[in-house]
Image (spheres, rainbow, N blue to C red):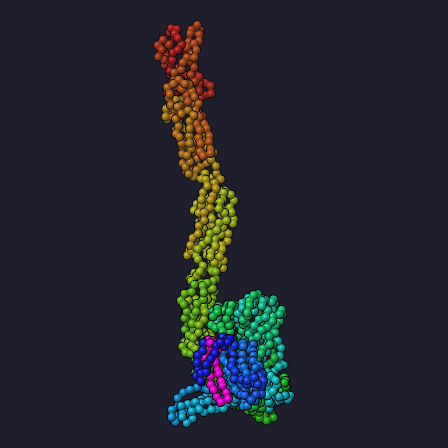
Amino acid sequence: LNGSGTYLSYSDNLIQTSTPLGSGGQYFTRKHPKLFVFAADIGGVTQFNINGNLGADGGGAVNGTILSATLNGITYNGMVKRVFGTSDPSVNHLIVTRETPGLTNTFSTNTDNDYQRVSGLSSTTRIYYLLFAAANGGQITDQQTQAIFQKFIEVISPLDWATASPSSGIIPVGATQDVTLSFSAIGLDPGTYEGELELTSDDARDPVVPLPLTLNVTRPVDHLEWDTIASPQSVNEPFTTTLVAKDDMGAVVAGFDGTADITAFDESSAGDTTTGAGTGLTFQLLDTSYRVHRTECLYTPAELGGPGRLSGMGIDISSLGNPSVINLTVRVKLSLRSSFSTGSQWDTTDWQTVFAGPITATLGWNQIPFSTHFDYDGTRNLLVDVSFSNATSSISTVVRCTTVTPSRVLLAGASSGDPLTWSGTTPAGSPSSLLPSLRFTRTGVTVPSSPATTTAFIDGIWTGPVTVGALGSVRLTAQTSDGKEGVSNAFALTSSGTLTLTTPSSATEGAGLLASAGTVTVSAAPLSDLTVNLASTPGGVLSLPASVIIPAGQTSANFDITVLDNALLDGSRQAHCSASAAAYPTATAITQIADDETTSITVSSTATIAEGTTSATGVVSLGQAAAADLVIELSSSTPSRLTVPATVIIPAGQSSTTFTLVAPDNNQVDGTGTSTVTAMLQGSSPGTTAVQITDNENRNLNLVLFYTTLVEGNAPVPSGGYVSLSGSTPTPVVVTLTSSDTSELEVPATVTINTGSSVSPYFPLTAVDDVVFDGTQTVTVTASAATFVNSSKNLIIQDDDSLTLGLTLPAALSEVAGPGAGTGTASIGIETAAPITVSLTSSLPSRLAIPSTVTIPSGQNSAPFSLGTIDNRIEDGDATATITATQAALSTTGTLIITDDEPHAATAIKSEDGLSYLVFSYRRLLPVTGQQSILEVSTTLDDWHLAGEEAEELSATPTGDGITETVTVRLLPAITVAAKKFIRVRTAPLP
């Protein structure tokens, strides 16, 4: 084992474990007369060696071979080494394993050396070794060895094709036990298989009871084959035909004893029907950007062109994706469903698989032949399920489509998994209105025929009568339960006329007898009584007489109809009635039967759903279980806020089903609302539930101003701003606009956001020219509306008014006038909105006192300030004072004269008229323009007096400019003295 040096010892029919045999290694040995057997379970052993020297002591010859035999579907190899042609016992080796690629058989050619090695056993788990000899050293040929080999594998080969159940148990004394034998030909080639069922017990009399078993395996049925049917045949008159089950070699499968379903179809209406205009494009049917994808599509009777046998389907590809080879599965079924919506569930039952395999996509129409046909009834919708599971994914394949409303497509993609097992809402499917345009191949229309199913085939053959109830070019189809099919030749049918059947279009279940409610009419009066056979399907809906007779010479006959009551909640049903007579085509009529059973309907769901969030689940419940699939109509009182499927189906035997509620994001500011979900079943009172939908749009107004700054007095801005909402509004919203300072900015009183809009029209902004110096102003514009949150924005208004700084001053002030000597005025040329402070400075602060500032109050354009003269008691003469006014960058000046009131020195001594005079000139300011004043002259010089005057007062009339005058006072000294004397001169208004 695995090389030299490892040996196993004789176990004498005991199973022993052995580490050298590898994982799970165990073996046993057994001696029989002329035979030694070794069997072992091995794991990981690469080679098996036989060593010894029982041989023929160098005489005779050695050869070997590898034999092969198959039993019960399992192939075995027998590695042979034989010694022969010597008088000594010749040793023969046979090593048996299941067939394994790479096995080799090597051995010594020395007859005295028993060495044999089998290599390539690494995957082998069981090995057998047989040692046997012929008498007198005779040769055991390949044929004889093959027989030994075959017999041995019959012993060791598991009987996989037969199983017994139960396999063990206890049988009481005197009792019996049934044992079921099951046979399976899976994996077996055609042929006869023999085996043995061995019953072992503790019964001492019969401890072992062998039961021989034989299994005949034939090739499976590949197709059915009709004998040629003569043409024409008479409609609704039986003719005998034969149907044979054949294998893929064309031989009769004699072991087939099953049955076949028979249908007849009129191929005169064969052709292709294309659904939709196909003007749109969609990747949704063959979205190969996913590894796994599934699409369910609903097609209406109008799109399919009525009933017919569908044998293929075409897909119109606009652009190729990757991969182009798609592992496609196509399934179809009749459906009560009319649309898909968010939360729709995947259909899981009653599918018929019509195609499964790879297709290579090409541009244009890709026709997919159905492996089994599908008979479409022309009254219900056709649900087509297209799915694939590919090894890779890349780019979507685009097909042509038609947009439909409501959505009739449900699709989803995934990275892994089996789309055929998807169910419920796992994974969640997405509804779509892009319906792929398909081209269905119709091989004809199914027509009435009988029998629906053959009796059992005998030795692979069925012969029996067939009746066809329609005119046209007809073929028969037979199909076994596992889909093996056969189609007959086409044959024509003839008739003696036509029948017309009339039944009520509708009735209510349990209505009972409807006397003479049915009529059958023949196209021409028969010469003898015509028996017309009547039937109604499904059973239990309408009861018709088995037949009615149209008397000879008459063209019609009436018959009673009884509307039955099955006491089941099964909804509205259709009763399909038929009338047939020999040599006349079968006539049909449909009566719609309304269910008379009612039940309570309740609807439940979550009380509140947030708009735009994930969907919620609702439940429709009936007061009793449905006896048939029931279509429940669902509706929402506000579909813009809450959507539900148009219909749901409660399956037979169930009393409830779930549905999905979706609160779509309608982008409307509509607040919290309540929607009523209603579930209706014909004949029963509807059930309702209220669901509150919370809005996900906020109620904040958003004020937008296109300007941040306006200049006062400019023309109004027609498009100054707008107000918006977080979504559109279902009703008009009147928004109030206010300005925090209407003297600076005017806005419209209101602006309206119209229904369906989220934005108001633009509104104007008007900056008011107030002719007031108020500088740059900030104005707040506010938008407000009932139940909404206000929004405000600031806007800067720049002033277009400027200041002109001015000063108004008296011409002159006497210094002796003091603090209240006069008043000046500071002006800015325009009214001010806020107090303005003007700074004042005097160029002669020692002669003229003024305040440092003067404030012009709000609403004024000027303000006075006081002027105070200062008597410095110095004879310094008149002086001009300059007042400077400043405000920010503005500046202006004004001047006035401060007159000196101090004594003046005589300026000259003049001689006049022979006398010497002291002359004093004085320029005086008149109190009032043009008014005379009194000049008071006084002196402390007793020796001076007014020349020519004895009084000390002098009246003078103003001269010059009318404001000032110069007065010359001449003083005549009594005696001549120095001229450095002083006098004081004052002026005062006349009394």
In the rendered structure, the answer to whether residue 525 lies left or right of residue 642 reads right
Q: Residue at x 56, y 90 (%)?
A: 459
Residue occupying the far top of the picture: 914
Between 286 and 436, the one lying in front of the other is 286
Q: Residue at x 47, y 44 (%)?
A: 796
Let me know if residue 36 is in the magenta part.
Answer: yes
Percent of width and height locating residue 958: 44, 18
Q: Is residue 355 above or below residue 414?
A: below
Question: Residue 911 falls in which quadrant of the image?
Answer: top left
Q: In this picture, which residue range is highlighted in magenta?
A: 20-43
Q: Which quadrant holds the C terminus?
A: top left
Number of marks present in the image shown? 0
Please say whether residue 789 is visible from this viewpoint. yes
Q: Is residue 847 above or below residue 483?
A: above
Q: Is residue 272 above or below residue 887?
A: below
Q: Residue at x 50, y 71 (%)?
A: 417
Between 850 and 292, the one lying in front of the other is 292
Percent of width and height locating residue 659: 45, 71
Q: Residue at x 40, y 93 (%)?
A: 204
Percent of width and height locating residue 924: 42, 19
Percent of width and height locating residue 627: 45, 80
Please say whether residue 69 is visible from this viewpoint. no
Let me know if residue 158 is in the magenta part.
Answer: no
In the rendered structure, the answer to whether residue 482 lies left or right of residue 642 reads right
